[in-house]
Amino acid sequence: MVQGLSADSSSYSFTPLVVLELASDTKQEATAWLLSRIRDRQQNGGAELLVEQLGPGAGAQEKENPNMFLVGATWQRLLTGAEDVGLFKEFNDGSMRGFTCANKHNFKDFKGYGDSFLSMAECQYIIKHELDTLRAKDETHVPGHTQAKLYPGKSIIRRLQSKGILIQVFPLHDKEELKRLSFSWYKKVKFSFQPLDDIRHYYGEGQALYFGFLEYFTFALVPMALIGVPYYLFDWEDYDKYVVFAVFNLVWCTVILELWKRCSTSLAYIWGTLSRKKAFEEPRPGFHGVLGFNPVTGREEPLYPNTKRQLRIYLVSLPFVLLCIYLSLYVMMIYFLMEGWALSVHDEEPTFWTGILLFIPSVIYAVVIEIMNLVYRYVAEFLTEWENHRLESSYQNHLVLKVLVFNFFNCFASLFYIAFVMQDMVLLRQSLATLLITSQILNQVMEAFLPYWLQRRRNKKMMRNVQKRRAVEDVELALAEQVRLEADMSMYLGTFDDYLELFLLFGYVSLFSCVYPLAAVLVVLNNITEVYSDAFKMCHVFKRPFSDPAANIGVWQLAFEAMSVIAVVTNCSLIGMSSQVKAYFPDSELQLILWTVAIEHGLLAFKFILTFLIPDVPKHIQINLARLEFESLEALKKKRQLHGGKCLKPRSSVRGCSEEERRSCRR
Amino acid sequence: MVQGLSADSSSYSFTPLVVLELASDTKQEATAWLLSRIRDRQQNGGAELLVEQLGPGAGAQEKENPNMFLVGATWQRLLTGAEDVGLFKEFNDGSMRGFTCANKHNFKDFKGYGDSFLSMAECQYIIKHELDTLRAKDETHVPGHTQAKLYPGKSIIRRLQSKGILIQVFPLHDKEELKRLSFSWYKKVKFSFQPLDDIRHYYGEGQALYFGFLEYFTFALVPMALIGVPYYLFDWEDYDKYVVFAVFNLVWCTVILELWKRCSTSLAYIWGTLSRKKAFEEPRPGFHGVLGFNPVTGREEPLYPNTKRQLRIYLVSLPFVLLCIYLSLYVMMIYFLMEGWALSVHDEEPTFWTGILLFIPSVIYAVVIEIMNLVYRYVAEFLTEWENHRLESSYQNHLVLKVLVFNFFNCFASLFYIAFVMQDMVLLRQSLATLLITSQILNQVMEAFLPYWLQRRRNKKMMRNVQKRRAVEDVELALAEQVRLEADMSMYLGTFDDYLELFLLFGYVSLFSCVYPLAAVLVVLNNITEVYSDAFKMCHVFKRPFSDPAANIGVWQLAFEAMSVIAVVTNCSLIGMSSQVKAYFPDSELQLILWTVAIEHGLLAFKFILTFLIPDVPKHIQINLARLEFESLEALKKKRQLHGGKCLKPRSSVRGCSEEERRSCRR
């Protein structure tokens, strides 16, 4: 069927989109086999992609890996791939529909051969999908590597990756587009929205949603920040006002989280990821187990009993997490000892230096918290890996849960202790400010400047080599240089850490908002710099990530909502505990507490009712989705009415006729 | 395409399944038009069903309506109808799949012509669906009834119903099957499970799920009842034990509600309603508005602005509900006045009669509550009708919400008042018992015995007429008699009231469980009689209802869960308020309350975590569903790979060839 595209088509010139890097000790036959499988036609079970070995770079040293391959595809192959991955594109009538080759001409921006209908990120995503779904046929192992066994029907690429033969697969940057994007994103000085559509176009939906959320979150905090400023400036201490501020904050937090769902749905609808169906999820590369038959697919693959995993989770991971939390609380108690010691030193002989000494325990503690978070993160990854989850999504959920719970305790335990055990509001305010500011500074350094500095050092070294060689050799080596430069860049590890940071910031803002109204201001300022530093690191520090067609921010929505529930509890108790409110109930503390509890329950109930009242999907999108569904139902009905007679006729005659005729038609 | 089935096929003998009753003053031409539309072929936009006028009954008096029509269908028509409604049946491999005529032979119980593959309830459901989707073509109004306008593409039957021309559509009972079912259901004396599959076979999934839930709920309460008995017998008053009991109850309530989800999923899977896709929802018959174009379907139909509806809800319905709640609280205060008066009379001169007088206010109050519930129910229906909801589901949700909130206040307000304002545990226990027992007795009378008695009177009258005529005429009139008998039976109004009753019982059990441990015992006893009286009324009092392919108990799951959350709050406060617990904290009531609140929050958090931990769908069903999805994905992929070449070839040549060939094939 496919003409003009044979196994030798890799010799044509093509746009390289994705880079495959094999280990330098890969056997020649393994490489040849892999390339032929990638180039082979789809009917024969190949991926039908174009692939070419990268020539030696300008800085070709003995250390350089020769096994770098560039992968691309023909325009037609990309279109069929777009159908395979279930890409949604804008239709002629403005709605978003799943792309199919059969009615490609009805899609809005489709103009014919080689146009910009598919973005580079989409093409790269398609190629990644096609590579990932390249399945073993009857090979028992990778040629030349007997230890790397293959099972019929399982992904070759994942197998190679887990066996260490394939080092990395990454998409190439597009220098021109990147320059344009980074200009409109963070190089313009004027205040404007982020170019979310361009970000999505270049990095995919997952990234764009993160930046969309960051922007939304920042704007959503502005009212809180604005209201918080006069509290700080005029030192408003009367609790009437604080109560108003706290209640506003609590309701506001619920409202913004609900409205974000609508926002994210709108974005996902425009970007076509909302209605997209998830493909069948393959096991993670690292998953291992005894060979057996998968009850779902019926294929032979490693199986791992669920009970064994549950045992690992409940008997090892859970106790370990609890132990870590205990450790974190222990460290907290040491901090309070230090704090007390510094205070006593300062009280004995107050000088300028002892005044500074007062802040040192907090700063040390903040640094220790960050270090503990970092260490715990690695251990959590190791543990979750060891739990041997079959699916990436289940792995991610368990990892997020582990990290969230620990980070929550680690960051906020001392504040809880100060607020509810020591009941020292001045210290609480001071600690909150110290923790917030220190963690922000540390984060910016760790996240952007450190990688940038490392990257620059690497780049300079590379550039020196390049300059040396360029004098001698051709200028045409630009592509090879770029590939090798990018291969050396750090891997972007996903939006996990970015969301986690926002989550903790949200905690600082919401949990104790009635004590430190300035928190929102600090977080807004931080977020503004965060946009720039994140944008910068995406464009210049990390490898380009594969796009991730996300329809929402996933488990993080839940995490933020949980935080806002906890915030209701903490704020109500803080207000109930304050001496100013206590003055209203001079006779009976009982009355005060009962009122506090009643109001707290009322607020919680209100939150839940609000969650129900605000629909998650905006009306116009609901209508659009309903229309598409209605159309497909009608089409199905028409089809049935056309073929409805089949049930009434004897089957054999109907089928016999058309089958024979069709066969003759093919001849 | 359809041969041997023409418009005159109604003259054949056929099994009548559904009865249509038109108003006796319907014009002749309207009847003729409706029948011809029902009989017309599907290609011409008809329903292609068999329909016959019912002959005069045995008791033919002048009052008798001659416009009764029996509707049936050929076996083939039922099969195509089964595909239309998306019926799920058991496949050869044991999985449940959507029935299609094309591969009918691969379904398990399909044996050929006229077998029991489709149950009578399914056939009736199919006929109802086909009648409901019979759409107007270019008629502007019903012939002979110019006031009954028709709009192209809108359901004729719904229009006739809302204009009062069509009085009722109901499915016929099957005397033989009903006898068998009622024998296995409630006539056997031995203790056994209900024949849920038979119930589903006869009444459909919605009914069967209700009875399944009733049975499940009864069994789930048995442990609570068993633990509650010794508390009552030995008068255990020490609160250690009560705390244990209350905590057990709270956790138990959460667990049983979660497990019910699994149960209901299993049932819905076996019955094939779990994966069934909802058809596009048509407007309710009573919906009215200004003519416009539906943004979803593009058809001309009445539109009603959402803002207007919102205004009606928030400016009329909401204040009205609040007013009703206020009224209900007012009645409650009158009850307390009466109670106090009776107590004072008894205290002055205690005799046997004043002893009885003590109970009279509670009994009167219980009766008043039931009457108020009943009256409110009608008003709520009227209001919700007036809110003019477009969809039946939205109407139902608003009705359920209105009724639930009011019933909750009406039934439980006095208990809350006694518990938390008067803090009189003895009175609470007494009131709880009186309310529970009175409402149970009233319910059984109102629900089963009253309708039964009315029905029997009607039946006897009818029978006397029949006997009179039978002497004169033929014995063959049995069918006509049955139809006219059933047409006179009361209409079954759905499971709403049954679920509402269970909901209130659940409230009595869970809200104050630590005060009156015997409540669970009473509810278990009530439920056992409830099974029998409900079964009896379904079989002998009401018309057979159309089956309702439900996959779960819908909004009631949410209502029960909300009740279990409220129960945590009430039970914790009851325990915190008890004098025995107060004795543990002699010095500080503050400590006590803080502990109570902390434990309450802990329990609530535990409930939510439990909800997450217990998966809603049992593992084996998850696997089955995943397998079906995987298979359909694989099939789609194969189909794409076969036709994948299309994208690469010029389209015209491919299509031209096959289209021409096909046309020649048909000739």
Image (cartoon, coloured by chain):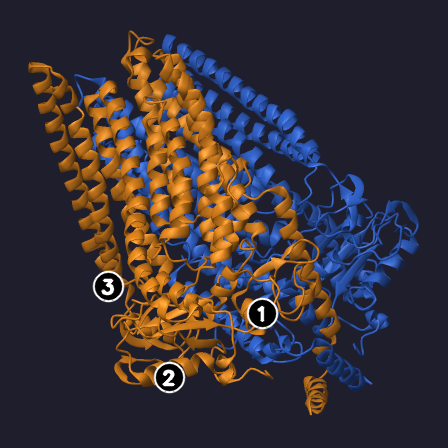
Chain colours: A blue, B orange
Of label 3 and label 1, which has the lower sequence position?
1
Amino acid carrying label 3: it is Lys
Question: In this orientation, does residue B441 appear?
Answer: yes
B279 left or right of B647 in image? left
Of label 3 and label 2, which has the lower sequence position?
2
List the residue tagged with mark 2.
B32
> Where A323 sits versus B42, above or below?
above
Amino acid carrying label 1: it is Leu
Q: Nearer the viewer, residue B554 or A394?
A: B554
List the residue tagged with mark 3.
B308
List the residue tagged with mark 1.
B79
Q: Secondary structure at mark 1?
A: helix
Q: Nearer the viewer, mark 3 or mark 1?
A: 1
Q: Nearer the viewer, residue A509 or A588?
A: A588
Subunit bearing disc 2: B
Which disc is residue B123 wearing? none
Place of residue A404 in the rendered image (x, y in percent of width and height, measured from the top left):
53, 35
Res B237 → quadrant? top left
